[in-house]
Amino acid sequence: MLVLLIISWAFTVAVATVSYDNKAILINGRRRILISGSIHYPRSTPDMWPDLIQKAKFGGLDVIQTYVFWNGHEPSRGQYNFQGRYDIVRFIKLVQQAGLYVHLRIGPYACAEWNFGGFPVWLKYIPGIAFRTDNGPFKAEMQRFTTKIVDIMKAERLFEPQGGPIILSQIENEYDLVEYQIGNPGVAYSRWAAAMAVNQHTGVPWVMCKQQDAPDPIINTCNGFYCENFTPNRNYKPKMWTELWTSWFTEFGGPAPYRPVEDIALAVLKFIQNNGTYFNYYMYHGGTNFGRTAGGPFVATSYDYDAPLDEYGLPREPKYTHLRELHFAIKRAEPALVSSNPMVMSLGSNQEAHVFKARGLCAAFLSNYDQTYSVTVNFGNGRCNLPAWSISILPDCRTEIFNTAKTRLHGSHKNMLPVMGSFWWQSFTEPVTTPADKGSFTVDGLKEQLSVTWDTTDYLWYMTDVTIGANEGFLRTGKLPILSIQSAGHALQVFVNGQSVGIAYGKAENPKLSFWKAVNLRVGVNKIALLSATVGLQNIGLHFESWNAGILGPITLSGVNDGKWDMSRWKWSYKKGLNGEDMGIFSSRGSSFVRWTGGAGLVTRRPLTWYKTAFDAPQGNEPLALDMSSMGKGEVWINGQSIGRHWAANKAYGSCGRCSYTGYYNEKKCLSDCGSSSQRWYHVPRSWLSPKGNLLVVLEEWGGDPRGISLVRRTG
Ligand code: GAL
């Protein structure tokens, strides 16, 4: 029996290993060129997962890469959630069933345009904590969560040596820059993080992306639009590319970036011909920032990313198919690629050949880096036409089977076809909050927003009274006083005596905002109520946990007899959240707590108004979305679940010219939707719908007309 056990143990160890050398990751002793794609499990629904994974497999991927989203898994300290969209074990098992591998980026810092970079907001309020540095309380929490995830994966036997699909893990994320900025504590922290990870004994290699000093045995990897010139920090580590950006994310207020597939394919082959061995599309399917998961500030609800699988899970052409053909061409060349180093030959002033030769194998890459001209080169026993800015693969050194610039399919135009336009809407307008409302409290001065809300809601009310004496000069002259407000962001709506007098909001590059307006004040007490809203918390940058939100002042009133009043130190009352949120009126139970009015009583274009309607699911299974272009800013719920923030009123600023695939790409090069809503359509997951009577609730902060909302089908 003992002998049998030893034999089976030895057998397991012998066949199921993941290791690496300077050439490649080795799985069970075999060197591989691994083709990977990011799909973040909470950015789609469990119902979509099998299809996304199948399409990724059909697209030629070997590996699915995902971050682990700490704040989704531990919303309150010690209370875990591994259900629904956060059922990470189910997601990984589905990948395994499809026969693909997993690269698990535990982080637990993710960045990812995800709220607070993936950190739970309660983490910020642990006494003495400082994120991502040599700080005891932070390291203790990071280790606890990392261990929790590793233990779950081990218990489910999901690491490759246990027979599972996980072949790689990641600790931290792009720490280089922070380390450079903070010096010694940063060096100490990254060493600690590396040792902590290695001591988890997962049996698979760890990577640290953008971490030049990643200690052995951790592999440092590259992230970027191009990575051909990257070299690992030791000559015995393989050259890996953990984030190949398939385009970029959209921000509210910005245009939608896209990246031509010809350039992505070129970037891949430049990397592969320079000994690259693993690359991961970030994103392969971007998906949706449901609920309040978007980071930022100002990251849009759609995380489409111009990825090969679009936000709705449909193939985006010609991207998807062209990359699929690229992958099959790489696979044909793989035996030669993993067995030799390339010989590089010049074929002209801007043209080269990379030839991989080993034991009867030969694969060649022919490149033309000229941005304007195509060329015909002589190679082997034939001639090969190379369009501008392109690379061809000849897996047998004779026949071209793929060129990065020769796409066979044309762009398919995705349509958003209305299926339902005239919903029967009812409205409910929130009264503007007063200090007498339940849950309000009063203190001297202005409070930072997150310190009050802990991000349980986007909203915080700031309220004060302004008493105007009958002797104020402006009452006679009619020259109204000016209310001026400085806020750390992200958006603001100002009410005077219950009336909205204006809005202001920041931008992604600078979330701070200023409000300045002449206001009509009357003799006696005037009620000032300021509704401050966050739009996703900071997810990147040095000590991003210390970024403030909300109205920090100064707040002044000028044009009074005294000249100017500084109201910043006055008594201010606070109330977090909206009444509708407190009552949960977006759910079927909560919606019965208020009186809705419809028909002639429907209120439109009024701030702080909730709308509800019911609808039956359209036939078929095409993906669905809401066209929100008639609305301002707020949030949308289907059957009680939030599909995310809507903000069609925020128009894309910038100029969107024509964009050529040739020449180096960056996220500002190819843009669309300038002058239109940054995001007009909002994904409604099919699986959230019942056949009949679905509750749709829209919160509108600024004023909109719900009669313009329609449900559309996305068709391929
Ligand atoms: C990277 C980061 C990712 C994501 C990406 C931009 O620097 O590692 O998490 O934020 O940028 O989409």
Image (tube, grey):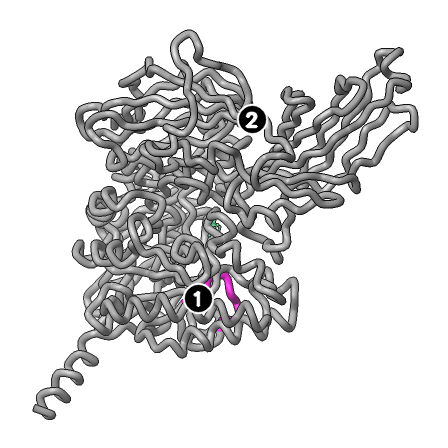
Whether 145 is drawn above or below 586: the answer is: below
Task: Give the number of the disc on residue 6.
Answer: none
- Give whichever of discs 2 and 1 has the lower sequence position: 1
Residue 159 at x, y percent in the picture: 27, 69
Q: Is residue 575 left or right of residue 386?
A: right
Horizontal side of 48 relative to 587 (left or right) equals left
Task: Name the residue beneath numbered marker 2.
Answer: 655
Residue 661: in sight, yes or no?
yes
Q: Residue furthest bottom?
A: 2
Name the residue: 31% across, 33% down: 639
Residue 82 belongs to magenta span: no
At mark 2, the secondary structure is loop
Q: Name the dominant secondary structure of the magenta segment.
A: loop
The quadrant where residue 459 appears: top right
Badge number at residue 171: 1
Which part of the image, by quadrant, shows the N terminus? Answer: bottom left
- Residues rendered magenta in the picture: 207-214
Q: Which tag is nearer the camera, tag 2 or tag 1?
A: 1
Residue drawn at 26 percent across, 50 percent down: 327
